[in-house]
């Protein structure tokens, strides 16, 4: 079924028709986790248009449908520019949406790509509460990395109007993570005056700070040499 749907191309009216079919099939099923449900959702994810955003958000808001939403998130919501995307991704963080471990990682990935820094507390809370029961260590590591990147983005937003002096102060602060964010920001701002200190911090025992400082040094040395 998904192959047939994907051949139709993006079509708002076709999407509405198949959403109706999906509702009838799932509402009449004892268990939502069926091949028919997954194939319908896969097909819908390939024909939906921006015009269907509210309708698909409505599906995501129904707890019974939420376990079947991953493909919609991957193939539609992850690419959406709709300002309401933050609220929709938050739905994936509900218990019903976390039926499959990959859902938290998926939500974190979309949050990073769309710079949804307001989701940091939700993702952190769920990560903390599920880590013990979640055996997939690589997936946990990816969520932790996504949280780091979200916090870095938040730092960039918060310090957008701050001067280089303020960033240099953070670079020498006691908070290693904030120092790492400052190193990244200094590299992005082409602050060559920070090169000596960044070279020193590139040897930091803190992996994140050392990595960010090295990346910043690499950027700034190109400018300095040029």
Image (cartoon, rainbow, N blue to C red):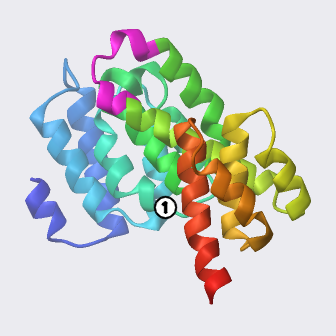
In the image as oriented, which residue stretches furthest toward the top? 132
Residue named by callout 1: 80
**Left or right: 186 in relation to 60:** right
Judge whether 133 appears above or below 66 on screen.
above
Residue 131 falls within the magenta-colored stretch: yes
Residue 13 falls within the magenta-colored stretch: no
Residue 105 in the image: state x and y as whole percent. 39, 36
Residue 126 in the image: state x and y as whole percent. 51, 21
**Left or right: 176 in relation to 110:** right
Residue 153 in the image: state x and y as whole percent. 65, 52
Pick the front one: 78 or 27 = 78
Residue 101, can we see it? no
Q: Residue at x 48, y 40 (%)?
A: 145
Q: Where does the magenta region start and end? A: 130-140
Disc 1 is placed on an element classified as loop
Q: Residue at x 46, y 51 (%)?
A: 55
The 10 Å Cα crowd at callout 1, few under 14, some 14 to 19, many 20 or more, is some
Pick the front one: 206 or 50 = 206
Judge whether 20 appears above or below 217 on screen.
above
Residue 154 in the image: state x and y as whole percent. 71, 48
Q: Where the C terminus falls, by quadrant?
A: bottom right
Residue 110, can we see it? yes
Judge whether 128 appears above or below 159 on screen.
above
Judge whether 186 appears above or below 9 on screen.
above
Q: Main secondary structure of the magenta part?
A: helix
Q: How many numbered marks are there?
A: 1
In the image as oriented, which residue stretches furthest toward the bottom? 226
Pick the front one: 160 or 21 = 160
Q: Residue at x 76, y 55 (%)?
A: 157
Q: Residue at x 13, y 55 (%)?
A: 2
């Amino acid at each position: 079924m998904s192959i047939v749907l994907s051949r139709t191309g993006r079509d708002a009216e076709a999407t509405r028709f198949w959403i109706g079919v999906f509702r009838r099939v799932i509402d009449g099923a004892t268990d939502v986790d069926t091949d028919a449900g997954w194939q319908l959702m896969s097909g819908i994810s390939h024909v939906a248009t921006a015009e269907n955003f509210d309708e698909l958000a409505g599906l995501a808001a129904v707890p019974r449908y939420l376990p079947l939403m991953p493909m919609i998130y991957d193939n539609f919501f992850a690419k959406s520019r709709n300002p309401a995307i933050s609220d929709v991704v938050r739905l994936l963080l509900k218990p019903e949406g976390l039926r499959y471990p990959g859902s938290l990682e998926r939500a974190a990935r979309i949050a990073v790509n769309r710079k949804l820094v307001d989701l940091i507390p939700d993702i952190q809370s769920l990560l903390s509460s599920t880590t013990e029961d979640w055996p997939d260590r690589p997936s946990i590591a990816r969520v932790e990395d996504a949280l780091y990147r979200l916090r870095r983005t938040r730092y960039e937003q918060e310090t957008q109007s701050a001067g280089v002096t303020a960033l240099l102060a953070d670079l020498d602060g006691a908070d290693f993570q904030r120092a790492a964010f400052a190193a990244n920001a200094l590299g992005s701002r082409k602050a060559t005056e920070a090169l000596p200190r960044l070279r020193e911090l590139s040897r930091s025992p803190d992996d994140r700070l050392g990595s960010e400082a090295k990346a910043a040094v690499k950027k700034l040395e190109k400018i300095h040499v040029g």
